[in-house]
Image (tube, rainbow, N blue to C red):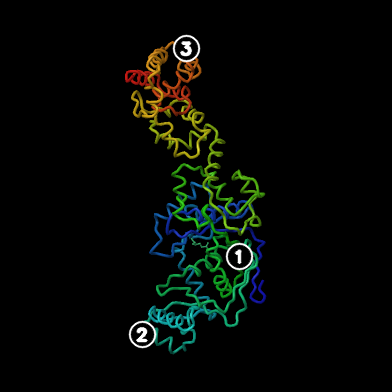
Amino acid sequence: MKEKGFIMAQHSSPVRVRFAPSPTGKLHIGGARTAIFNWAFARATGGSFVLRIEDTDPTRSTDENIRIIVDAMRWLQLDWDEGPEVGGAYGPYRQTERMDTYQKALQQLIDCGAVYRCFCSKEQLDEEREKMQAEQGGYSGYNRACRHLSEQEVQAHLDAGDPFVWRLKVPDNHPAIEFDDAVYGHMSFPADVMDDMILVRSDGTPTYNFAVVCDDINMQITHVIRGDDHLSNTPRQILIYEALGKTPPVFAHLSMILGSDGKKLSKRHGATSVEEYRDKGYLPDAMVNFLALLGWSLDGETTLISRDVLCKAFDLARITKKDAIFDEVKLDWMNGAYIRELTAQQWARLARPWIEKAGATPEFFALDAWAEKTFALIGQRLVRFEEIPDKLAFMFWGSTLKALDDASFKKVLAKADSRAKDVLVACEAILADTSIPWECNVMQDAVKQLCDTMQLKPKAVFQPLRVAIAGNMVSPPLFESMELMKREDCVARVHYVASLL
Ligand code: GLU
């Protein structure tokens, strides 16, 4: 539908959305948020989610970045219905493999006179820009010099082999370009300041705006959900849709993500790529939940939202245009909440690489449900998986106490009035007694009896033992940990520490 330059996009066909990263770097948090919104919208509407790689900038796009982005998408479990690795009916899904489609669209524009060749050199354009800046105090785009070349002039340039680009002929007296953004509402851009933008460069490659529009048309995209850094491109793209005689999709532009200091999220704020968050040990479910709430809400209050709910309830109407704040404290809280919700089996699978980093060898994992039991040790108070190696390392030191914390040694073992040596000698005898089963409750009761026999407070017994086993007065629950270790290793450590005193 088109009236007075105001294009209303209406779609009754099934939703088709796309996430279209340029592989010029890793998957940024902002990009991941855009991907999640598109994915959730497709799932909530029973539509299709397309992953398209926008790699037309040869100087900055790399295969390595494509791999990193695809890996990050897989890690977040944002499954795409069409795109790299899965294919689809509208492929290929990499812009550099779609050159023929841009050529075809260009030909259509040439045939209907909507584009023209521009032979202006970079020097000419620079000079012109400087002149206009000096004269008018502002540059308002290309001066359209080549728009009015005669056929003979064009031919002369071609005969001379002059390089040229293709520019869009913005129609004269075009009314304001208007559209209803699903987030920002009604938008209006004056058309008379629209540049005769380049669609195809002198090397034949399409510019970003041209390639995006061609792809979105050919892939039958119904809704373009993307960052509002693209908002100023939208009127330009609408002009291209018009020139190609197509109805634009619905646009939904997402507000910026700011750090908690109110400034645009950047490296200064810490990790900015999905990869970095993965490597710090955030759970993909927590990340998806957290990022989904950067500009969208379920009901304004619910914070823990599962994928299932997100995929049912997501809608564009609840996206806010207010800038979103990336609150790392909230992310940490949320990640902890997701960790606590894991089953021991899920924990064992997800935490395994981190438990290995702590030093666990395959022989530990071979023990029945061994890894699952580590959940009870540390799962309840963990914020990120990256804390696991530090917390569990002592369990894998074998018979040697590889680190003995100085402060713990002084405070618990080496105090003048401490009976730590006697305690440890007695503990060693209990731990070494194979008639006492190596089970945490049994061991704990046995050691507790020392309190009576030695007339000591529980702390005076348990803390020396803890330091002797874990090397630190702070550790996961002691007897539960010991149960997952070898008896002879524990005995050896206690013997060693007692010998230091
Ligand atoms: N490739 C663009 C980018 O990474 C996105 C284009 C779009 O969504 O229209 O910013």
The image shows residue 347 at horizontal and vertical percentages of 50, 34
Sequence-earlier tag: 3 or 2: 2
Would you name the residue on which mark 2 appears? 160
The three-letter code of the residue at mark 2 reads Ala
The image shows residue 256 at horizontal and vertical percentages of 54, 59
Q: Secondary structure at mark 3?
A: loop
Q: Is mark 2 within 8 Å of ligand 1?
A: no
Would you name the residue on which mark 1 appears? 249
The three-letter code of the residue at mark 3 reads Gln
The three-letter code of the residue at mark 1 reads Pro
Q: Residues within 10 Å of mark 3 (few under 14, many from 20)?
A: few
Instruction: In this rendered view, identify the residue nearer to me: 283 or 210.
Output: 283
CB atoms at circles 1 and 2 under 8 Å apart? Answer: no
Please report the residue visible at 46 percent of the width from the left and 30 percent of the height from the top.
371
Please tell me whether mark 3 or mark 1 is closer to you in this view. Answer: 3
The image shows residue 345 at horizontal and vertical percentages of 52, 32
Q: Secondary structure at mark 2?
A: loop
Please report the residue visible at 38 percent of the width from the left and 80 percent of the height from the top.
123
Please report the residue visible at 48 percent of the width from the left and 29 percent of the height from the top.
374
Would you name the residue on which mark 3 appears? 455
Sequence-earlier tag: 3 or 1: 1
Please tell me whether mark 1 or mark 2 is closer to you in this view. Answer: 1
Q: State the CA–CA distance, disc 3 to disc 2.
A: 104 Å
Q: Secondary structure at mark 1?
A: loop
Instruction: In this rendered view, identify the residue nearer to me: 184 or 137.
Output: 137
Q: Is residue 25 above or below residue 417?
A: below
Q: Is residue 122 above or below residue 30?
A: below
Indicate the quadrant containing the N terminus: top left, top right, bottom left or bottom right.
bottom right
Say left or right for 189 vs 166.
Answer: right
Sequence-earlier tag: 1 or 2: 2
Please report the residue visible at 45 percent of the width from the left and 28 percent of the height from the top.
475
